[in-house]
Image (spheres, rainbow, N blue to C red):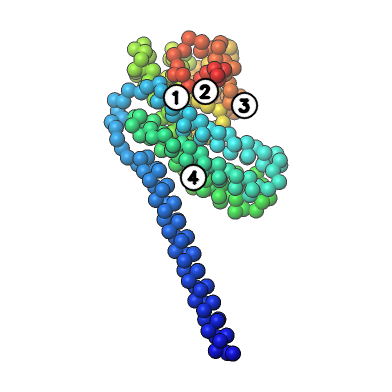
Amino acid sequence: MDKRFSRTATLYTIVFLSMLVFAVVAFFYGLNLGTKRVETKYAYLNEVKVDKTNYEYQQQELASFYLTVYSPYREFQLDWSEALHNISNRKVSNVSSLYKELEGQASKKAIEAASYNLQNAGQLGEAQQNYIRSLNQFEKVAAALQKKSSSITYEEIVELLKSNESYQTAVTQALKGQGIYFETMYLWATSIDPNIPTDFDQNVSQKISTWSKYPLVIKNEIIANYLVKQNSFVEFLPHDLTSAIDQFITSGQAEAMNLTTIDGIITLLSNTAAVRPGDYNLNKNKLYSQEFLPQIPFFYPNVE
């Protein structure tokens, strides 16, 4: 009886260990296969294929970038901001669950942003990499916040983000991508319209009189670069701030307040939270009806 039991126990042990070994092997095989598939999918992002210095951008490339890279990223950015807003207003009962959703969304949007190969499209390929890296880092941040208490407060999250390396990288990469995107719009415009200056003052410390002579594509690039330098991760877009500046000037407020430089206006607008997403749309017809712009949805929001 003891021998039969011992044999049965031994057999069960062998079967159990065999199944365990098989499960471990299957797990690591699946992990390795998944890793290789991801590496293959993103491999082209690390390839340098074109000379970016003299590249001539096509409007279709700018539009494709918007649809496949910028738009997915923008959707995530707005959801991220809305989540923080809701937490600050105590509208979220389970913060961990919310950041679990954002983690999954960041992963999904990164895949969307990598779905179209733009590595042959000059600096747009670099901007694509910036946005994907940003989303990957946001995924890490969301995963870290998910592990915190479900009742973590808005103030605690803000303090955590200040010292979180992944978050800082996510912000930096996003702003770099945005800066490059707006630069390519300017380069596209100069290749088509010979009247657009190829040399201009890129500093916001410039005089209002100088700024006012520039077309919108130059103003937007100046502001996009300014946001990069300030590491300013905001909900409004560069052309929202541009339009707020121009509206402030044309309304006579800058002169009335004796402001003579663009950085002075920016400081005032920032301190009073006077710039909001959609400001460009409000001022478009009044200020920019004759401007030369690429056919990108955020410049023409009312066009279906």
Q: Residue at x 37, y 22 (%)?
A: 58
Going by the numbered disc 1, the residue's amino acid type is Ala
Q: CA distance from mark 3 to mark 4?
A: 31 Å
Give the number of the disc on residue 272: 3
Q: Residue at x 63, y 40 (%)?
A: 84
Give residue 47's quadrant in the image: top left
Q: CA distance from mark 4 to mark 2?
A: 25 Å
Residue 131 visible in image? no
Going by the numbered disc 2, the residue's amino acid type is Phe
Q: CA distance from mark 1 to mark 2?
A: 10 Å
Circle nearer the viewer, 3 or 2:
2
First in sequence, mark 4 or 1: give its number: 1
Please name whichever residue, 50 or 217, is drawn nearer the observer in this view of the structure: 50
Q: Residue 256: x and y, percent?
A: 58, 13
> In what element is the residue under mark 2?
loop
Going by the numbered disc 4, the residue's amino acid type is Gln
Residue 27 visible in image? yes
> In what element is the residue under mark 3?
loop
Are the residues at dot 4 and dot 2 in contact (C-beta closer than 8 Å)? no
Left or right: 282 with respect to 293?
Answer: right
Q: Which residue is mark 2?
A: 298
First in sequence, mark 3 or 4: give its number: 4
First in sequence, mark 1 or 2: give its number: 1
